């Protein structure tokens, strides 16, 4: 068996420099959703809460049988689920970042940007919750097992795992949001949410990517092996979270049939692959796609 040649070492900028630049960007372009979104504007009849092509049943025989009203209701429930998953993730990320701060210089720019990012994420969680309520949906709640895992995970996310874990939660959604936020059939309040989130998440993604690149300069083979394979657990976690059977129950559909057709839906699988593609390329570039990790991503529909 042959191995890939070692890439020549590079000299990434110190994380303190990256943090200083991103703090400047945060000062110049951040949003307060409480005033940046028109919360009093009425919902628009006939507009979707997610574009048709990203709805899990789109392209299936079941989709063809649904009325337009049923399709819009399904889009609202899928939006509520996506935003609920976003709330869970940003909660976990903030707690992991708080633990990271215990090991950092509180007077340095790295710690200051981490606090800035946490402030962004707190506003995002508020925004997600308010939009769920505004569109007339209810949040999707974690089960007991998931709450236990969510409480334990911040204590595991350290070093490379913290940065890669942040990218798994941010990049996949970001890639989809960039594709759909200008859809003319999208409810205006959803488009506003996505524009805010894309703008601010771009800084968070850059920070996490720089953290990965910086860490990889001195990473051992063991660290690369562990991170490259443990990251693959994001595949089954995301697949289960984003195809929650409760979506179809709340939309008044046949849950068993919906789950079955979503599982075999090539359109849904293509959307997952498109969303994961930028992160997959980054992981490959940094040699963080282990054999098991690749298998898990592919098995759960995120790799072709």
Image: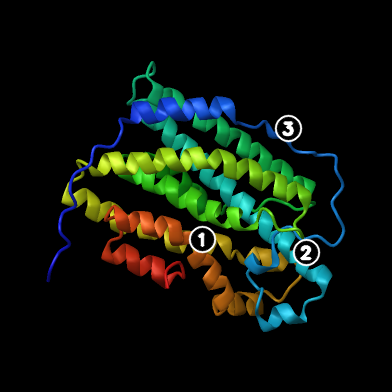
Extreme residue toward the top, this view: 107
Q: Residues within 10 Å of mark 1 (few under 14, many from 20)?
A: many
Residue 56 occupies which quadrant of the picture? bottom right
Which residue lies under the disc numbered 3?
34
Q: Residue at x 35, y 26 (%)?
A: 16
* Residue shown at 44% from the left, 52% from the top: 168
Q: Considering only vertical position in the picture, is 24 above or below 165?
A: above
* Residue where numbered disc 2 is placed: 73
Separation of residues labelled 3 and 1 (CA atoms) = 28 Å
Distance from the alpha carbon under mark 1 to that under mark 2? 23 Å
Q: Secondary structure at mark 3?
A: helix
The x, y position of residue 223, in whole percent, is 22, 48
Q: Is residue 5 left or right of residue 120?
A: left
Compared to residue 125, the image places residue 248 above or below, namely below
According to the picture, the residue beneath numbered tag 1 turns out to be 275
Residue 42, position in %: x, y? 87, 47
Crowd tier of the residue under label 3, counting other residues whose Cα lies within 10 Å: few below 14, some 14–19, many 20 or above: few
Q: Residue 7: percent from the left, percent from the top?
A: 19, 52
CA neighbours of label 2 inside 10 A, class few (<14), some (14 to 19), many (20+):
many
Image point 30% across, 60% down: which residue?
Answer: 289
Residue at 42 percent across and 55 percent down: it is: 279
Quarter of the picture holding the N terminus: bottom left
Q: Is label 3 or label 2 in front?
A: 3
> Could one spot residue 273 in this view of the protein?
yes
């Amino acid at each position: 068996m042959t191995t890939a040649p070692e890439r020549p070492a590079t000299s990434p900028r110190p994380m303190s420099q990256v943090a200083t630049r991103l703090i400047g960007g945060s000062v110049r372009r951040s949003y307060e959703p409480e005033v940046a979104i028109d919360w009093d504007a009425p919902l628009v009849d006939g507009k979707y809460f997610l574009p048709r092509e990203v709805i899990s049943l789109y392209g299936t025989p079941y989709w063809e049988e649904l009325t337009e009203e049923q399709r819009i209701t399904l889009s609202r429930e899928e939006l509520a689920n996506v935003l609920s998953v976003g709330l869970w993730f940003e909660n976990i990320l903030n707690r992991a970042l708080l633990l990271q701060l215990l090991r950092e210089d509180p007077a340095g720019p790295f710690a200051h940007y981490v606090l800035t990012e946490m402030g962004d994420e707190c506003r995002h969680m508020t925004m997600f919750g308010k939009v769920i309520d505004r569109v007339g949906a209810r949040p999707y709640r974690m089960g007991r097992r998931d709450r236990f895992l969510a409480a334990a995970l911040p204590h595991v996310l350290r070093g490379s795992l913290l940065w890669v874990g942040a990218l798994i939660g941010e990049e996949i959604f970001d890639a989809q949001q960039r594709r759909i936020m200008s859809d003319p059939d999208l409810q205006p309040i959803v488009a506003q949410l996505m524009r805010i989130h894309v703008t601010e998440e771009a800084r968070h993604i850059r920070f996490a990517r720089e953290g990965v690149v910086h860490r990889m300069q001195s990473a051992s083979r063991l660290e690369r092996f562990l991170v490259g394979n443990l990251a693959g657990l994001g595949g089954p976690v995301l697949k289960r979270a984003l195809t929650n059977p409760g979506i179809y129950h709340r939309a008044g559909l046949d849950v068993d049939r919906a789950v079955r057709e979503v599982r075999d839906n090539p359109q849904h699988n293509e959307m997952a692959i498109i969303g994961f593609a930028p992160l997959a390329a980054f992981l490959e570039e940094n040699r963080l796609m282990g054999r098991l990790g690749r298998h898990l991503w592919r098995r759960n529909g995120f790799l072709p």
